[in-house]
Image (cartoon, helix red, strand yellow):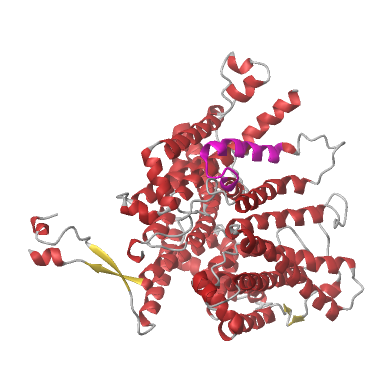
Amino acid sequence: MSNGSKVSTGREPLIRIVKREYNNKLIPGLIRAGALILSIIAGGLFIWAMGFNPFEAYKSIIRGALVGSARDPMSSIRSTIDIFVPLCVTALGLSCAFKMKFWNIGGEGQIIMGGVFATFFALNYPQIPRPLMLLIMLIAGAVGGALMALIPALFKVKFGTNETLFTLMLNYIAIYIVKYLIAGPWQRTPGFASIGKLDKNTYLYEINRQNIGWIAVIIVVLFVYFYLYKTKSGYEVSVVGESQATARYAGMNIRKIIIKTMLISGAICGIVGMIKVSSNHTLTEGIGGGVGFAAITVAWLSQLNPFIIPIVSAIISILQKGSTVMQMNMGISSYAADVLQGIILFCFLGSEFFVRYSLVFNLRIKEAK
Amino acid sequence: MDTLFNFLYASIIASTPLLFGTVGEILSEKVGNMNLGVEGMMWLGAFAGFYAAYKTESFLISLLASFGLAAVGALIYAFLTVTLKANQNVTGLTLTTFGIGLSLVFGKAMITAAGGAPKTSDVFNAKVAAINIPVLSDIPYIGKIIFGLNPYVYIAVAIAIILYVYLMKTKTGLNLRAIGENPAAADASGINVNLMKYINIIIGGGICGIGGAYMSLVMVNGSWQDSGVVNGYGWIAVALVIFSSWNPAKAILGSLIFGMFSSLRYYVPSDIIVIPTAFYQMLPFVVTTIVLIVTSIKKNKENTQPAACGINYFREER
């Protein structure tokens, strides 16, 4: 420090952090756009450092996710949508719990249990006609996911058990339950850990060769929006999330709200499990496939906004599908999608700080000179 | 008798990466930062340790490389959560995605360059093989499980003991625990909260990375596969932190017990007791869940998560 600093009062830091006050949404939008551009540049540098042409790589990703083959132009979009639907619906489900500041990391386990419950009916009652079967599987999936979410919620309200760690553990317990089932009671052929292909009457309907899972996205977006923003329960959820003390003072039944919201959150994730089983035509131990984890970051990136979640999910889905094509075309590992996703998230996580606060450089030291 | 000691030996071998991951995560959680990126940092360490060993054949360089790359991952996490106050859970999960992705992308490039799955040389393999201290390791039964282990095991136990002393018996350790319990009070008493957080998160991450290197160099016999190197061990380590109630010394025992769970199925006579494999694999997670529930019911303040763990500290928002 120069001599001039003696003049200033005490030791003031050079940079101060001040909370931003907004009247418009322009600045946060600009900051987030900046984060997106930064992440695209950083991702490009990564690809370039690996010895590939970043422009070609990005082009390959976008074309790979959206442009199909000449014979079947919709094929790529179909598989992108197959990635998009589970991710988006799960993120919507988790956002209900997050709104309450209840850390439901258990999306993966709830998806899996939804799939297990749906598969139970698919395997044991194959004679049920298709429409009824799909309805039963849907309800079973929702119940399975809801039960899986209910366990940590009950322990949370009764004993204050840490829900982050509890739901995390349940993910693994769920995976091994599936492993047990497909190698044990539900095994089709001895020696193969597989339940084989399910009967045709358990398959989701298809329109233009695209299964109708996407309808769930529309319904769940609207449901979550109305539930969280237009109902009394939704209002209570956000009050509990902001401050449990306030909620208690206002006479809200916090336990009931937590349990109800977790049931909804889990049920939505459970439906994803049903969709997965019904569109994959089987149950495997990879049914969750990390969607439950990816959805956490999607929900967070979207600021828990039910209309932003589909947009962010679409970006991530394009990245994931496109990377598999990029691997074939350019020889970069398809795991580059995870790296790019990580870079995007890091940039956005960091940018939120600048949305909430601004840096004020303390120039008084120089002035005193 | 032989079977019992073989079982113990196998359990120690299986528990070592868990011990690295667990004590690394304890260090981070003790300063109030729950880092769900353990799995990712272990992957980073697995790649860096392997690559260094593959290129240089030096144990020390491999050790430093695995520590270093994982520490860089932890640095990203620390910058985002400590300086930029980003949500810890999301940042940690992102670090896991990023770490796994980066290691596999680099790994794939390494495979392409080598024209097949790269293998570490025999020279290096000898360095990470069981040490077998003369005479002592020949003591019947216990000789092998105490004096006949590979160097990583001793490093892991040494780190756990050092961290125990550091956390529980030194003044710096006391300061550090104060940050995890009540950062505002720690700040008021003159502790540099952010600096301490940075240092411990980064060291903790580096330690996790060594555990990853152990997995790529010892557990899969020094050959880099395209996937499945760390295999969820990072998540078990996160669970083990709870199981060992945030105590590095208990982590030694805890990881040994978890190591036993994972090697148990090879030693239970399968013609007498028939338990599906999945249940053995599920066991660590079930036990951890039970521990989690029991500690929350007992409301035992001594053995629980640091009070401020998971919550970012922001001086201007007190």
Task: Look at the image and tell me in which quarter the C terminus of chain A lies.
Answer: bottom left
Q: Position of residue B244 (x, y in %)?
A: 58, 42
The picture quadrant where one finds residue A293 is: bottom right
The picture quadrant where one finds residue B67 is: top left
Residue B245 sits inside the magenta stretch? yes
Q: Position of residue B280 (x, y in %)?
A: 74, 44
**Which residues are the magenta region?**
B241-263
Q: Position of residue A1 (x, y in %)?
A: 14, 54
**Front residue of B231 and A25:** A25
Q: Main secondary structure of the magenta part?
A: helix
Q: Is residue B103 left or right of residue B79?
A: right
Q: Is residue B187 above or below residue A241?
A: above
Q: Is residue B124 left or right of residue A8?
A: right
Residue at (62, 58) in percent of width and height: A159
Q: Position of residue B87 (x, y in %)?
A: 47, 63
Q: Is residue B199 above or below residue A9?
A: above
Q: Is residue A208 left or right of residue B124?
A: right
The picture quadrant where one finds residue B162 is: top left
